[in-house]
Image (spheres, helix red, strand yellow):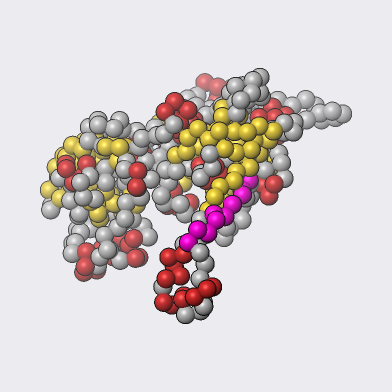
Amino acid sequence: MDSLPKQFSQQLALVAVALAVGGGAGWAGHYYVTQVSLAEAENAAAATPPAVETSLTTVAQAAPNPLSAGPMGENSQNFIALAVDRVGPAVVRIDAERTVPEISPDAFNNPFFRRFFDEEAVPPSDLPDRLEQGTGSGFILSANGQILTNAHVVEGAKTVQVTLRDGRDFEGKVVGVDSVTDVAVVKIEAADLPAVQIGSTQNLAPGQWAIAIGNPLGLDNTVTAGIISALGRSSNQVGIPDKRVQFIQTDAAINPGNSGGPLLNDRGEVIGMNTAIRANAQGLGFAIPIETAKRIADQLFANGEVQHPFLGIQMVELSKEMVDRINEEEQLNLKIADDDEPGVLIVGVLPDSPAQAAGLKIGDVIRAIEGDPVDSPPDVQARVEATEIGGTLNLDIHRDGSDQSIAVKPAAMPSDLR
């Protein structure tokens, strides 16, 4: 990701976001009533649910009904059990093995370390690499063996071991890895495999059911259930600021080994890929929206890599508190007026970047992109990610007391920033 200027304080650096990035689409809430009287139901049938706007989309649709379950009794199943029966066979365990270099012998040339060793005790220069093993989850997208998982599950491994719920083992080839979104794809040579049903996040709202399946701690096909806790969590909020994703938050338990497994709705459709947990919290799990994961997966299967649009700026949200902190930062040499207008402040412009070529400067405030207001770095990230490389992005900015428009042509993100 983009690095911050050295003169920028550590405190501000924590809130700076490298725009090399953009994420999944936003989500909208919806009108969802669980219990109504007969009269209320008749009135609701004729009413149009109010639309809730996000920075990216407007949705006005009712929530789907859960899988119908028969009357409680002998052999009856609830909707969670039905969802697991439908999807469970398509959830796999992925065992990856990668080589990790041991401590470089060059480190022992440092006098600080050498004084602890005799000349004969210094390790040789041809130390063997160390093998590192890990276990994660994945799910089958197609009957011919296309599998979706997290990049951090298979990164550094050329082949992996894939185990199905029925016990069959396959050697899988890692087709492509995109560390920017933490998405990877694996292919196994097989036919007539069980595959998941892809759902949608367009009607997703906090409070709806969420079901997670994976292999936490090596315990295959473990099922946990909860609700959708929140939507559109930025990578900064989740604690992995180098990713380009707006996450689904859930309280369905997600533990080490769940990474890459599916997050389901109450119909047993995949709405996300479980990808992150917060080690210092309980009841917090995060998933990549399925639209983002599937879009990246399709590109990886087609090309083996993904090109992300890139501007080359670093940003912070223009809140009153941030304005005060920036104005106090003498080394930054910026004086920002607190005009109560929303926007995103540019605090860094990378050399030889599209932003520099377009004339963007430190201190510029981005007010809107293509006429749509933006008020946070994730808003800008999402708009950039949705732009074609080489296309034109029109930014409305505020500079030195006046407003102007600047056209920027996003380029492909350099490999050293991924």
Q: Choose between 215 and 345: the one closer to the eye.
A: 215
Residue at 69 percent of width and 27 percent of height = 86
Question: Looking at the image, which residue sits at the far bottom?
Answer: 115
The residue that appears at 14% across and 42% down in the rendered structure is: 404
Residue 263 position, x and y percent, is 60, 37
Residue 211 part of the magenta segment: no
The x, y position of residue 302, in whole percent, is 44, 25
- Left or right relative to 138: residue 404: left
Residue 133, magenta (yes or no): yes
Q: Which residues are magenta?
A: 125-135
For the C terminus, the image quarter is: top left
For residue 268, side relative to residue 181 (left or right): right
Q: Is residue 237 left or right of residue 320?
A: right
Quarter-of-image position of residue 58? top left
Q: Is residue 41 visible?
A: no
Above or below, 199 relative to 404: above
Q: Residue furthest front?
A: 120
Closer-to-camera residue (69/247) = 247
- Measured from the top left, where is residue 118 in percent x and y? 51, 78
> Going 78% across and 30% down the picture, which residue do you hit?
77
Placement of 288 over or under 347, stated as above or below? above
From where the camera sits, is residue 22 visible? yes
Instruction: Check the image and report above or below for 294 versus 136.
Output: above
| Rendering coords of residue 283 (x, y %) | 61, 52
